[in-house]
Image: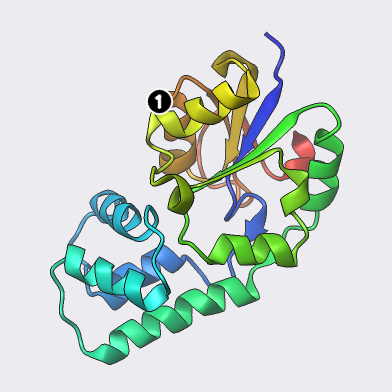
């Protein structure tokens, strides 16, 4: 069946982080070294990225409560500073705009991402990407992470597109590929450093 819609992840797929691995830095700041990353990331994203907090301080305070931590106040300030730096220094990959503009002529383009309420929206506006998407599905707006099947299902229903007519493009095997497959949608891994095994895999967006 012909593909009619393409889902895109954001960080590491369309846009490069301004700092290295922000979510891993949070884990380090909070001294959660003994916690398995897969366990940590589920808890972190669930509390930090599915609610509309007034600001980052409120969001990180909720994270501390979730992990039952009570660090000195400067830890929260460092987290906020790092997260803001990531947003400010984020840069669009060279090929992103050109490829999305070309694909938009033939496909419905959907951005789907687990995110806090401010960072992605800020970068979308700064990089003039918003108008390139037919739908933007952010966890902070929907209250659902990508791992929730309905995150994909609801937007496909709205666009009147079958799941067999869609594909997901993302850089994370866990968050993007497995989430899409869980929803019955084929996935393409983008692996810019060529470090992981998956088929089909591309190294940049031009290979789409």
Residue 20 visible in image:
yes
Which residue is pictured at 41% across the width and 60% down the height? 52
Residue beneath label 1, please? 182
Q: Position of residue 34 (x, y in %)?
A: 17, 63
Describe residue 4's horizontal placement relative to residue 183 as left or right: right
**Label 1 residue SS:** helix
Tell me: residue 49, above or below residue 91.
above
Q: Position of residue 5 (x, y in %)?
A: 68, 26
Which residue is pictured at 49% across the width and 25% down the height? 153
Residue 189 visible in image:
no
In which quadrant is the N terminus drawn?
top right
Colouring of the image = rainbow
Callout count: 1
Q: Position of residue 15 (x, y in %)?
A: 66, 58
Describe residue 178's horizontal placement relative to residue 13 as left or right: left
Q: Position of residue 111 (x, y in %)?
A: 62, 43
Describe residue 113's horizontal placement relative to residue 121 as left or right: left
**Residue 187, quarter of picture:** top right
Residue nearest the observer in this picture, 32 or 65? 65
Tell me: residue 68, above or below residue 188.
below
**Residue 60, quarter of picture:** bottom left
Describe residue 192's horizontal placement relative to residue 84 as left or right: right
Q: Residues within 10 Å of mark 1 (few under 14, many from 20)?
A: some
Tell me: residue 139, above or below residue 107.
below
In which quadrant is the C terminus drawn?
top right
Which residue is pictured at 45% across the width and 48% down the height? 139
């Amino acid at each position: 069946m012909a593909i009619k819609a393409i889902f895109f992840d954001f960080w590491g797929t369309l846009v490069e982080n301004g700092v290295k691995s922000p979510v891993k830095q949070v884990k380090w700041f909070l001294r959660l070294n003994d916690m398995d990353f897969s366990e940590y990331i589920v808890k972190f994203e669930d509390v930090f990225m599915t609610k509309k907090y007034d600001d980052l301080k409120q969001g990180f305070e909720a994270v501390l409560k979730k992990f039952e931590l009570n660090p000195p106040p400067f830890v929260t300030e460092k987290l906020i500073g790092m997260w803001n730096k990531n947003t400010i220094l984020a840069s669009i990959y060279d090929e992103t705009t050109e490829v999305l503009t070309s694909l938009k002529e033939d496909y419905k383009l959907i951005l789907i991402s687990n995110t806090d309420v401010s960072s992605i929206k800020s970068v979308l506006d700064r990089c003039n990407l918003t108008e390139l998407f037919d739908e933007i599905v952010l966890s902070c707006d929907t209250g659902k992470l990508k791992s929730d099947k309905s995150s994909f299902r609801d937007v496909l229903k709205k666009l009147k597109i079958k799941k067999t007519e869609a594909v997901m493009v993302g850089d994370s095997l866990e968050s993007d590929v497995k989430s899409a497959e869980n929803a019955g949608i084929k996935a393409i891994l983008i692996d810019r450093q060529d470090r992981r095994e998956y088929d089909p895999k591309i190294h940049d967006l031009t290979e789409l």
